[in-house]
Image (cartoon, helix red, strand yellow):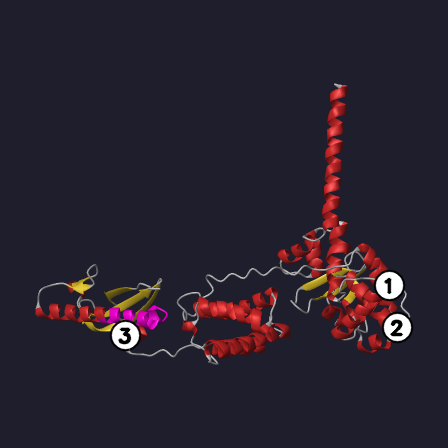
């Protein structure tokens, strides 16, 4: 895209200026409202300068010579602008100035910028960034590097060469070669877009290569246990202790909404009396750092007490003797088989069950559920609301009942009249 510029010659008042003395002539190059100034290397008396014409006034030889020199500078700036367009470079006032002065700006390379971004993120771990976030960006670096090597036989590319074709090529690569689903593709493209947005902000890119990119990834449908299935798991008697333990922790999360990592790190000191005098959980989500204030229902309190004397809990001050996520999910598959549940039972399903079956389906407002889950945005919670058909059905039946009652009252009033 041909980005226009404007050029202004003007007299600049120096420090300690003495009236009647010449002032230095400066050039101001402006692109998209951002100016850059540099000296024209000449000076002129204010009385002989016309701001409207950007030139000196008069017919004397020295005036004609000065104006001719300024015309030459004007053409030189125009040439610098034209050369930048031919080179496909980002058009900025700084770039035009540097081109005119003969300064060559070092190209900026995609993977170098990505590496610098990740290095800074690593330095900020625990200060707004979490290890899992960094891990995702490092995975993105691996995928992008492999894509560049396969598609361009390069380990890195100049960011100015990133266009819609490069973007769509990477999307196709993620879906076919890497085998990512739509949600994973959206995540890696989001990482890529963050880097290009950074380059746009720094004026290293002139156009947004993502402007025409659309990723229509459908949110995964969140599976959850129904009330009947939840009761089946909660009331099942297990002869194998490890299955009974995993079931207890799963049920605890079904009634608190805690994710695996949060129950694993849950300390006894995190459970204290709340504003109502009952026991609450006071901590924060590992994933986002959002504060969690969760009142404990009786079933959750009973489960906490059940493991209060467990050796591992006593020694480490934790609430539950949690195994690895891999083991927990493996044991949950056994539990599902023994309980006759055909759904793929995973630990995270407990969080979904809390959001749907335990809270939303029982009339708990979505704003409250969002706070209990530690969601940063309401739209995240709304994904759960879309699948609670039982609650929708109940609400509509209640509405129908009220409408019928209202109609009956009208009929009675008409008869009475």
Cα distance between the residues tagged 2 and 3: 78 Å
Give the residue furthest to the top: 417
**Left or right: 40, with 228 as reference point:** left
Q: Is residue 158 above or below residue 352?
A: below
Question: How far is disc 1 from disc 3 in space, using C-alphas?
Answer: 77 Å
| Quadrant of the image occupied by residue 56 | bottom left
Q: Main secondary structure of the magenta part?
A: helix
Disc on res. 241: 2
Q: Which mark is residue 192?
A: none
Query: Percent position (x, y) of residue 396?
Result: 72, 42
Residue drawn at point x = 74 percent, y = 45 percent: 393
Q: Spatial distance from mark 1 to mark 2, Cα to Cα?
A: 17 Å
Q: Which residue is mark 3?
A: 100
The secondary structure type at the circle numbered 3 is: helix
In terms of sequence position, does the residue under pointer 1 or pointer 3 come before the other? 3
Badge 1: few (under 14), some or many (20 or more) residues near its Cα, within 10 Å?
few
The reply, left or right, for residue 188 in relation to residue 259 is left
Point out residue 1 in the picture as x, y percentages from the top left corner.
35, 64
Q: Residue at x 85, y 61 (%)?
A: 234
Of residues 104 and 384, the one drawn nearer to the viewer in this rendering: 384
- Label whose residue precedes the other's in the sequence (1 or 2): 2
85 falls in the magenta region = yes
Span highlighted in magenta in the image: 76-96
Q: Residue furthest left?
A: 60
Residue 208, image x, y percentages: 44, 65
| Quadrant (top left, top right, bottom left, bottom right) of the C terminus | top right
Q: Is residue 16 visible?
A: no
Residue drawn 47% across the image and 80% down it: 153
Note whether residue 283 is visible: yes
Provide residue 385's location: percent of width, then percent of height.
68, 53
Instruction: Identify the residue position indicated by label 1 in the image.
Output: 302
Return the disc, 2 or 3, that comes first in the chain's sequence.
3
């Amino acid at each position: 895209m041909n980005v226009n510029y404007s050029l202004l010659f003007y007299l600049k008042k120096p420090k300690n200026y003495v009236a009647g003395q010449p002032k230095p002539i400066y050039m101001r190059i402006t692109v998209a409202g951002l100016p850059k100034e540099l000296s024209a290397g000449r000076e002129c008396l204010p009385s002989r300068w016309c701001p409207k014409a950007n030139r000196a006034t008069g017919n004397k030889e020295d005036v004609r010579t000065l104006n001719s020199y300024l015309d030459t500078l004007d053409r030189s700036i125009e040439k610098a602008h034209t050369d930048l367009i031919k080179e496909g470079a980002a058009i900025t006032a700084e770039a035009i100035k540097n081109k005119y002065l003969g300064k060559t700006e070092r190209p900026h390379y995609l993977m170098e910028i990505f590496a610098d971004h990740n290095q800074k993120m690593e330095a900020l771990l625990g200060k707004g960034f979490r290890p899992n976030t960094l891990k995702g960006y490092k995975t993105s670096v691996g995928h992008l590097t492999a894509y560049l090597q396969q598609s361009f036989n390069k380990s890195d590319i100049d960011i100015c060469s990133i266009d819609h074709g490069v973007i769509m090529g990477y999307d196709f690569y993620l879906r076919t070669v890497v085998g990512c689903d739509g949600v994973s593709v959206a995540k890696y493209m989001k990482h890529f877009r963050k880097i290009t947005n950074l380059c746009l902000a720094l004026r290293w890119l002139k156009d947004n290569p993502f402007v025409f990119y659309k990723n229509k990834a459908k949110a995964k449908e969140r599976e959850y246990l129904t009330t009947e299935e939840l009761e089946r798991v909660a009331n099942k008697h297990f002869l194998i202790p490890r299955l009974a333990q995993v079931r207890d922790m799963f049920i605890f999360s079904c009634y608190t909404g805690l994710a695996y990592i949060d129950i694993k790190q849950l300390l006894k000191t995190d459970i204290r009396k709340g504003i109502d005098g009952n026991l609450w959980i006071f901590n924060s989500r590992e994933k986002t750092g959002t504060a969690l204030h969760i009142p404990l229902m009786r079933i959750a309190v009973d489960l906490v007490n059940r493991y209060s004397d467990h050796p591992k809990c006593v020694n480490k001050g934790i609430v539950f003797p949690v195994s690895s996520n891999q083991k927990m999910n493996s044991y949950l598959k056994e539990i599902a088989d023994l309980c006759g549940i055909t759904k793929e039972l995973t630990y995270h399903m407990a969080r979904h069950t809390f959001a749907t079956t335990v809270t939303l389906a029982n009339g708990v407002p979505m704003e409250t559920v969002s706070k209990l889950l530690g969601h940063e945005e309401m739209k995240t919670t709304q994904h759960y609301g879309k699948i609670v058909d039982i609650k929708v059905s109940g609400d509509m039946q209640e509405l129908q009942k009220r409408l019928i009652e209202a109609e009956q009252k009208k009929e009675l009033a008409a008869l009475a009249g």
